[in-house]
Amino acid sequence: MINWEVIIWTCITIGVLLGIAALILTFISARNIKKKTSELKTLHSDLKPGMKVMFCGAVYGKVIKVKDDIVEVEIAKNVIVSVSRYAIQSVA
């Protein structure tokens, strides 16, 4: 004979535990995203000529000039590209 009451309470318990785990993961993810966003804001506002940077596409270069939202970066000798300051991922 199947004891349906035990099966139902087991399902409810598993559902509650999964819900708690989902909330914890959501909280941790939100905190990490907020931290990374803050770091990138600081990086983008502190860009100066002479800094070595890496783009999101893993291209390295040296900042030549910073204008508003456009940054001129030398990626090879005499090869200068204009990119958005938000395309820069990190300082090398």
Image (tube, rainbow, N blue to C red):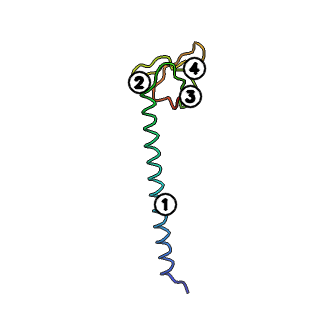
Residue type, label 2 = Asp
The residue labelled by disc 3 is: 92
Q: Are marks 1 and 2 in contact (CB under 8 Å)?
A: no
The residue labelled by disc 2 is: 69
What secondary structure is marked by label 2? loop
Mark 1 nearby-residue class (10 Å; few <14, some 14–19, many ≥20): few
Residue type, label 4 = Ile
Q: Earlier in the sequence, mark 1 or mark 2?
A: 1
Looking at the image, residue 41 sits to the left or right of residue 78; the answer is left
Q: Nearer the viewer, mark 3 or mark 1?
A: 3
The residue labelled by disc 4 is: 75
Residue type, label 1 = Ala
Q: Residue at x 47, y 49 (%)?
A: 29
Q: Residue at x 54, y 84 (%)?
A: 2
Residue 69 drawn at (x, y percent): 41, 24
What secondary structure is marked by label 4? strand
Q: What is the CA distance from the residue labelled 2 to the residue labelled 3?
A: 20 Å
